[in-house]
Image: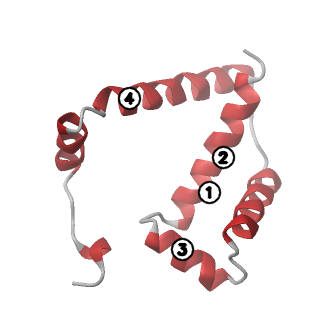
Amino acid sequence: MNDLSQIFIENEEIVNFFKREMNLKEVYQKILFKKVILHIAQERGITVTRAEVEAEADRQRRKQRLEKATDTLTWLADQLVTPHDWEMGIRDRLISVSSTSLI
């Protein structure tokens, strides 16, 4: 099978993998930290604009040398990430940067 993205992995399998590899605590702490930062950002009214997300997406595309939309979609598919997930990740990172600079 050439396309491994077609193999479904249950959420429980992912959690069990992290447990067996002794990485669950690290991942858990990262998720918890992200939730705290996003909560603080929401309380303080910290947001990012669509233009800021697009600018960061463009920066990442240049870094990855993704010249066409199809290049970006292929790269995202290879990473097992949807365009929406990618944009939400960018948004979260930009909010985290803004929030942590105020803490």
- Which residue does the image show at 78% across and 18% down from the upper left? 102
Q: Are marks 1 and 2 in contact (CB under 8 Å)?
A: yes
Decide which of tag 3 and tag 1 comes sooner along the chain: 3
Residue sitting at the far top? 103
- Which residue does the image show at 61% across and 84% down from the upper left? 70
Q: Which mark is residue 87?
A: 1
Q: Secondary structure at mark 4?
A: helix
Q: Quadrant of residue 4?
A: bottom left
The alpha-carbon separation of the residues under discs 2 and 4 comes to: 22 Å
- Which residue does the image show at 22% across and 71% down from the upper left? 7
Q: Quadrant of residue 103?
A: top right
Residue sitting at the far front? 21
Residue 60 higher or lower than 48, as above or below? below
In this rendering, position of residue 6 left or right of residue 64: left
Which residue has dot 4 on it? 26
Decide which of tag 3 and tag 4 comes sooner along the chain: 4
Which residue has dot 2 on it? 91
Which residue has dot 3 on it? 75
